[in-house]
Amino acid sequence: MKQEQIRNFCIIAHIDHGKSTLADRFLEITGTLQSRQMKEQVLDQMDLERERGITIKLTPVTMHYRSKNGQEYLLNLIDTPGHVDFSYEVSRSLAACEGAVLVVDATQGVEAQTIANTYLALDANLEIIPVINKIDLPVADPERVAREIEEVIGLDSENILHVSAKDGTGVPELLETIVHQVPPPRGDEDQPLQALIFDSHFDPYKGAISYIRVFHGKVRSGMKIMMMSTGKVYEVSEVGVFSPEMIQVEELGPGEVGYLAAGIKEVADTRVGDTITDAVKPAAEPLPGYRRVLPVVFCGFYPVEANEYDNLRDALGKLKLNDASFQYEPETSVALGFGFRCGFLGLLHMEIIQERLEREYGLELITTAPNVVYRVTKNNGEVVTVDNPALWPDLGDIELVEEPYVEANVITPSDYVGAVMDLFHDRRGEFQEMNYLSPQRVQITYLLPLSEIIFDFFDRLKSCTRGYASFDYDISGYRAADLVKLDCLVHGEKVDALSMIVHRDQAQQKGRALVEKLRRLIPRQLFDVPIQAAIGNRVIARETVKALRKNVLEKCYGGDVTRKRKLLEKQKEGKRRMKQVGKVEIPQEAFLAVLQVDKE
Amino acid sequence: MIAFYIHFPFCLQKCRYCSFNSMPVPENNILVTRYLQAMEREIALYASRYPNESLSSIYLGGGTPTVLPAESLCRILFCCREKFAFSPGIEITVEANPGTVTQEMLQLLREAGVNRLSLGVQSFQPVELQLLGRSHSVTDIYTAFDAARKAGFDNINLDLIYALPGQSLESWRENLRSAIQLNPEHLSIYGLSLEEDTPLAVELKKGKLEACSEELHLTMWEETSSMVKEAGFIRYEISNYAKPGKLCRHNITYWENKPYLGVGAGAHGYYDHVRYGNEEEIQKYIEMVEKGEFPRAFEEHQTQKEEMIDTIIMGLRLTKGISRLDFTMRFGCSFESLYEKELKKMVEDGLMGISDDAVFLTERGRILSNYVLSCFV
C-alpha cells in the first residue's frame, strides 16, 4: 500500500482511562476482530500492573479502514508500555509512529504518567489528538478535564474530541480525525533499509522476533540484514504483519509496521531502539535515539532451598531470553549462600521478574533489599560504581559518594498536598514547583534520591492520597550525598545480606528500627542473641533476643498427639527455611526487615 | 492388650479455662439414656471387630463422669466386662470432681471394679477455684478424698493447676503442701494453658487479668519438682508424679504410643495404625451409632514416619525416655542411627541423654521439650 494511505499511531492513556476498550472499538469498526487478544507475556503481569496503576500493553495491530471519502487506509496501532521503568521503550514505540491519541478519562482528569508520555510524544514530533473518554458516565466532567488538558499539556480545548469507547459514541469521528490529522509516513523505498526495532518477543521455534517499523527501503525474507548497534548479520527467515496474530507477508516497505524473524537466538540481539539495515547495502546512519538501557535498581535473589540454585539459574536464563533489559550474575552471601545479583530498570520491573520466578517457575526466593547504583570516589582517585552494599569500600578509603537523583512528578487532589509534601520531605526531597491544574488538582515536582523511591514509596503515596495520586519520575543525574553503610551484626556475626546504604542523618533511626524489627523476628535461641547495627566499627543500636528458657506442652494425652505433631512439624518447617548465620538461625522475613524499617 | 477410654461429655458447669467437648447435664434424661446406650453399642461394635483383645486399662473421663449416677457408670463397666476379657491387674480409673461424689457412690464404683480415682482438685484456695470457675469448694476436696479412702480407694490422683493469673509463688507452694498432706498416690500438675476463646483467655486478652510471667512460671515449675520429689513422688512424665508402683498404666499407653480405643462423643483412639476421632456432637454421635456405624469424624491412616514421630514426641515425655530396643524392634532401625546428628547436638546442649537402654530428656530438656521435639519431627 502507498505510504499516503498508511497511518501509524499509538494511544497514550492512564490505567483504566479506557485504552483497551477504545482499541476494541477500532477493531470492531474496521472489522479486524471482534475481540482482541492481549500479548501473552504481558497478560501474566496484569495483576501487578493493575496494582501499580500502569496500563496493560497490547500487541501491535494492523487494521484496514475505509474512510468516509471512500479512500482505503492501513492503520497501524502500536502500544506503549505505561510505566516509568520503561520510559525508554515508550520513547521507541512513539518513535515508530507519526501520531498519538491522548485519552483522558472524563471523570478523572490528566494523570502524571499521561503527561510524561505526552511530552515524550511531543519530543518525537508526533501529531497529538486529544480525546476525552467516558462521556457516557453521569459524573463525567468533560469541561473541567478539557481545561486541564489545555492547562497542562497546552493543547487547544476546541479540538478535543468527546467519545465513549464503551458505547461507541464519537469513535467513528475519531478514526476520521486520525486519518486526516496524522501525517502519512514519508519514507524512500529506494534508500538502503532503515527499520526501527520497537519491541520484541521470544518464540521457541523462530527465535527472537523483532517488532519493526520500516522507515526507508524494504525488507523481505532471504535478505541479509545487519543490526547497526552490534554489526551482527542475520538472514531474514520471515516478515509479516500483526493482524493482530502474526501473518506472513512478502515484504515490508517504507512506513509499514510488522515483524521480522531471522533465527536470532536471544532478544538481547534485537535491542529496542536499534536500527536494522541491509547488510549488503547498509545505511550510512542508524535512526536516532538508540541507547543501551542500563539497570538502575539491583537486588539479590537467593533460593530458599540451596538445592534450587540450578533451577533459579535456568529460570533467570529463560526470562532473560525475552527481556534484554534485565541483568543477572552469580553472587555469594555469607548469610544466604549462592544466589544472583540482578539489575532492573526500576522497582516494578524487579517485582515483575520476582513474581514470574515465583509464579511461573515455582521458585521460593529470598529477595534482598533493592538498592541503586552508587558512585564512590576513593582517596586514591579511583571511581567505583557500587551496586551491592556488600562491595561498599572501607569507610577510611572513601573520598566522595554520589547517588542517582530523580525528578518526581505527582498529580494529586489538592486535599492531599500536605500529605504528599510530608512524604517527600521524609524522603529527602527538595521542592521544585507546584502547579494548580484546577482548583481541585495539583501537580507537584520534587527532586529526590532514587533510593528513596525504591522503598515502598508508591504504596505510601497511594495510602496518603487514598489512591488518588498518580506518580512519575525521570532520572536526573548523580549528586554527592553523605551516605554510609549500615551493617547488622547478629550474635557478633556480620550479616552481609542485611547491610544497607543510608544517609548519615537517618542512620541512627534506621539502625534502631532495624534491630528492633529483627528482635521481634529472630526466634529465641538457647542463648541470648545480641543484635547490633553499626557503621564501621561503631555500634549505633542494639537489642537482645532473650534466651529461650521454657517451651513445653505440659498436658499431652492420646487425643492431643496429632495436633502436637502438626504443631511441631510447622515449627520444623519454619526452622528448615531459616538461614544459619554463625550459631543463629535467622528466618527469611528478617531479610525483608530492611525494607520495612521505614514503615514503623 | 489394649486400653479403653470412655468419654462422658457432661459437666455441672463449664470451667473458665476449659475448651473441651463438654455440656451441662441435659434436663432431658432421655438424651443421657440414649447416649449411654449408644456407648454400649459402640463397645459392642469394637468387641465384634476385635474379639480377641483383652483390656489392660479402662479410663472413664470427661467432662465429669460422676455427674451421672454411679449405676450408669457401673453399667458401662459391666458392658466392657461382658464384651471383653480383662487382663490381670487391670487398672480402672474414674475421673471425678470433688463435689460430685458421695461415699455411697464411690463404694458402688469400687465394687464395680474401679480401682483408681482421679480427683480434679486444681487448687486449695477459694479465690483460685473461683477464678478457674470450678464448681467445688475447698471443703468438698477434703470430703471427697476422705470418702474415697473410706470406700477403699488406695490409688488416688489429684489434678492441680498452677501459674494462674495473679497467683504468687507462696500461694502455689501452699497448694502443693495441702495436696502432699493428703498423701495421695499420684499427682498430675499442669501449668495453666490458655486456650483461645475460653472466658479466662478473653479476660486476659482484654487486660482484666495479668498472665503469670514466664519467669514466675519457671520458678513454680522448679519448686514443684523439688517439693514433690521430697515428698516421695517420682516424676515419671513431664507433668505426672507417682508414688513407687502407682504410675498410671492407662496414660502410659498414650505415652508409649500403644493402641487404645476411644468410646463416646469426641473420644479419640488409635488402633491398627489408624488415629481416629469420634463425632463430637452428642446427637450426631448417637445417630451414627444407632445406624450401626463407627461414629467417627475423622481417621488418619498413619505412615510409618508419622507413627515414629508420634512415638518420639510422646515417648520422650516419659522420664525413662524411649527404650532403644523397643524402638528398633518397632521401626526396624535404631533411634541413634536415624537421628545421629540431632541426638549428638541435643546431648551436647545438655538437653538429652543416652544410656545403654534408652534415649531421654534431661531436666533442662524437659522444660525445652518443644524445642527438642521439633528437631525430630
Image (spheres, coloured by chain):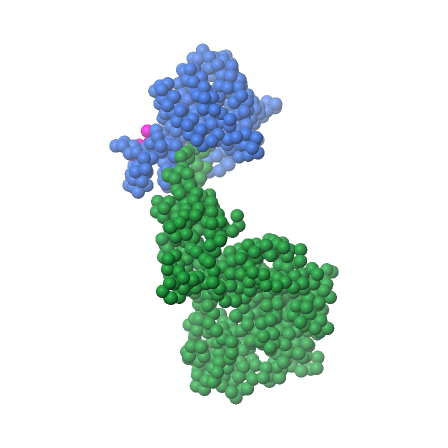
Q: Position of residue A99 (x, y in %)?
A: 62, 76
Q: Residue at 63% of width from left, 55% of height from top?
A: A418
User: Is B210 rendered above or below residue A40?
Assistant: above
**Which residue occupies the foreground of this view, B113 or A418?**
A418
Q: Is residue A134 left or right of residue A38?
A: right
Q: Position of residue A185 (x, y in %)?
A: 59, 82
The number of numbered discs placed on residues in the rendered structure image is 0
Q: Which residues are magenta?
A: B320-324
- Is B322 part of what is drawn in magenta? yes
Q: Quadrant of the N terminus of chain B?
A: top left
Q: Is residue B65 visible?
A: yes
**Which residue occupies the foreground of this view, A531 or B230?**
A531
Q: Is residue A536 left or right of residue B43?
A: left
**Which residue occupies the foreground of this view, A214 or A512?**
A512
Judged from this view, the residue extending furthest toward the top is B150
Q: Quadrant of residue A213?
A: bottom right
Q: Is residue B343 left or right of residue A561?
A: left
Q: Residue at 37% of width from left, 18% of height from top?
A: B231
Chain that the image shows in green? A
Q: Quadrant of the C terminus of chain B?
A: top left
Q: Quadrant of residue A280?
A: bottom left
